[in-house]
Image (cartoon, rainbow, N blue to C red):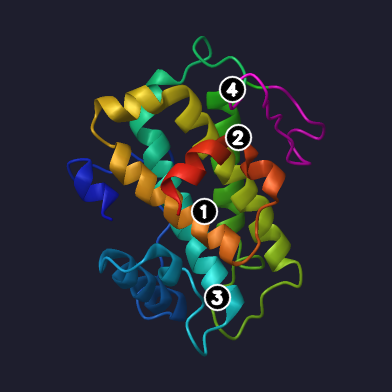
Amino acid sequence: MDLKGFFGGKERTFRPKKKFEPGTLRYQLHKKAMASLNSGLDLKAVVALPAEEDLNDWLAVHVVDFFNRINLIYGTICEYCTDDSCPIMSGGPRYEYMWCDGEKFKKPTALPANKYISHLMEWVETLINKETVFPVNVDVPFPKNFVNTCKNILKRLHRVFVHVYIHHFENLVAIGAEAHINTCYKHFYYFVREFNLIDGKELEPLREMTMKICH
C-alpha cells in the first residue's frame, strides 16, 4: 500500500519522515517488509517474524514504519483538527488521553488533540533518532527495555488512529482514503496482536470497527 502515491505523491507528513540508511540491516528488513506488504499477501502472514531474523530488529523496523505512516495519515487531516474542533485529545465521549513525557510534561496534562499529537510525534521522533534506543549499527546492542519502549510508542500511536477514526473519518472519506487507511490500520493491528504489544483496554475504543475489518 503506497500512501505516498495515493495522496498524489506529496508527502504531507505531520513531521519529517524517518528513513533507513541504504546498506544497513534495518534498510534490508524494511525493504523485505514493504515488498511483502505490497505483494498482496495476507496481512496476518506479513507481520510474522521471518525465520532467522531478530525480534528487536523486526520491531524497530515496524515502529519506524508505523510512525511514518501514521504521520502521513494525520498530515492529511490535521487542518481539520484544531483547538476549536478538538479541544481535548479523545476517542469519543468515553476516552480522553492526557499527555505526559516526564520532561516537558511531568504530570498527565489535558491538551487539545493537535497539541497532544504534536508532542507525541516529537517524542517518538526523538526516541527513534536516539542511537542508544534505536541503534543503527548491528554491533550496538538494543537496550534491555527496548520491547517496553516499543510498546509505549505503539500504544500512543494507536491513540492517533482512535482520534482520527472517531473524530475525522468523514474527512478521510471526503478524499477517498477510507480503504487505504483501513489497510494501514489492519497492518498495525495484526502486528501489535502478533507480538502482544498493546493491552486490550487500549484497543477497546475501536473494537467494533476492528471486528468488522480485521477478520
In the shown orientation, is residue 160 left or right of residue 16? right
Kind of residue at disc 3: Asp
Give the SS element for disc 3: helix
* Number of the front mark, 3 or 1: 1
Give the SS element for disc 2: helix
Task: Please tell me how crowded label 1 is: few (under 14), some (14-19), or many (20+) other residues with Cα within 10 Å.
Answer: many
Give how far across and how far down residue 109 sits, in percent: 75, 26
Q: Which residue is mark 4?
A: 92
Give how far across and how far down residue 77 sits, in percent: 37, 28
Kind of residue at disc 1: Tyr
Q: How far apart, in angstroms, are the residues tagged by discs 3 and 4?
A: 35 Å
Q: How far apart, in angstroms, are the residues tagged by discs 2 and 1?
A: 13 Å
Q: Earlier in the sequence, mark 3 or mark 4?
A: 3
Q: Nearer the viewer, residue 213 or 4?
A: 213
Q: Is disc 2 in contact with disc 4, using a CB cutoff of under 8 Å?
A: yes
Residue at 66%, 53% in the rendered image: 198
Q: Is residue 16 visible?
A: no
Q: How far apart, in angstroms, are the residues tagged by discs 2 and 3?
A: 29 Å
Which mark, by number, is residue 189? Answer: 1
Kind of residue at disc 4: Gly
Q: Is disc 2 in contact with disc 1, using a CB cutoff of under 8 Å?
A: no
Q: Is disc 3 in contact with disc 1, using a CB cutoff of under 8 Å?
A: no
Q: Which residue is mark 3?
A: 57
**Rendered position, 16 above or below 31:** above
Give the magenta-colored segment's residue range. 90-110
Kind of residue at disc 2: Pro
Task: Please tell me how crowded label 4 is: few (under 14), some (14-19), or many (20+) other residues with Cα within 10 Å.
Answer: few
Q: How far apart, in angstroms, are the residues tagged by discs 2 and 4?
A: 8 Å
